[in-house]
Amino acid sequence: MDTKELLKKVRKIEIKTRRLSDHIFGGEYHSTFKGRGMTFSEVRQYQFGDDVRNIDWNVTARYNEPYVKVFEEERELTMMLMVDVSGSQLFGTQQQFKKEIITEIAATLAFSATQNNDKIGLILFTDEIELFIPPKKGRSHVLRIIRELLEFEPKSKKTNITEALKFLSNVMKKKAIVFILSDFVADEYQQTLKIVSGKHDVTGIRVYDRYEEEIPNLGMVQMEDEETGELLLVNTGSKKIRQNYSKYYNEQINYFKDSFNRSGAGSLSSRIDESYVKKLLGYFKRRG
């Protein structure tokens, strides 16, 4: 992609996603996440209407009357976008690849955070960390993130979510709002996700294509494994092969849902031919 074409693409994504974040997501993002970055400020005597969950029992016992902790909202938060750039993200049978939708979602979230004067960072991962952009503020920084999402060429095609989560833990010492964008066709990340979700506010956004859900009956078909590059001759006419694939796919999806539920993290799924706007709004409203 030459520079001119790239800039045109970046601008197109900015116009579309900025409009969404300005009109729709700014307020929702604020109400969903702003109240979560709280720092302890002081204690004062309990007043009628105070939240009893904020009672400081030690001070209350000392003075023999109820005292509550007062919290201040942290002025800025940090959003980390963790984006899977492995081979399977290039799958797509509609007008768009998963990668393109993931880029739009990431840009929308980034502009929503910018409206709140928050910092935004980016981790691009496969089975290794491909790129890390430390959190910063501002439009030009978001445009750089969009540029990387559009044109970055990963070294690997495989996926390892656990390694990406471990890296996040190492670089982010303060609590962050974390969005993981992937198709989540991966194994054994539940334990690490649990640890990371204990410290950060994590949401998994699964982006998928409907033709990944099941193999259509097309007879003998040559297929390429997106992550290994291996060419395979598959008899899609075989009911057993279709059933095995369906079983494997459903296991991966159930693992994704179960892992995020058990970790206390948020999750949503969006098919590339569906409106991710509705999905994101619904998610923000549920959490707000």
Image (tube, rainbow, N blue to C red):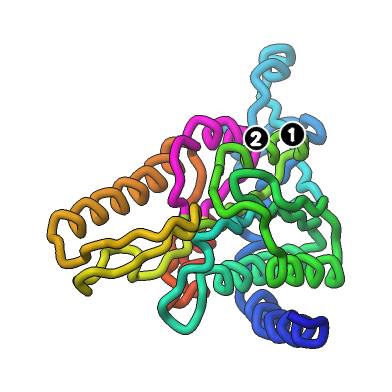
Name which residue type carries label 2: Lys
Residue 154 placement (x, y as % from top left)? 67, 58
- The circle on residue 170 is 1
Kindly state the secondary structure of the residue where label 1 is placed: helix
| Identity of the residue drawn at 60% across and 39% down | 51
Between 35 and 271, the residue placed more toward the observer is 271
Q: Quadrant of the C terminus?
A: bottom right
The residue lying at 36 percent from left, 51 percent from top is: 253
Residue 17 falls inside the magenta stretch? no
| Percent x, y of residue 242 | 20, 59
Mark 1: amino acid = Asn
Q: Is residue 146 above or below residue 134?
A: below
Disc on res. 133: none
The circle drawn on residue 166 is 2
Q: Tell which residue pokes out farthest to the top in this image.
A: 62
In percent of width and height, residue 66 lies at 66, 25
Q: Please name whichever residue, 33 or 209, is drawn nearer the observer in this view of the structure.
A: 209
Query: Which residue is at a point 67% across and 54% down the rendered structure image?
Result: 155
Q: Is residue 201 left or right of residue 7?
A: left
The answer to whether the residues at label 1 and label 2 have Cβ atoms under 8 Å apart is yes
Q: Residues in magenta?
A: 184-204
102 relative to 170 in the view: left or right: left
In the rendered image, residue 203 lying in the magenta stretch gets the answer: yes
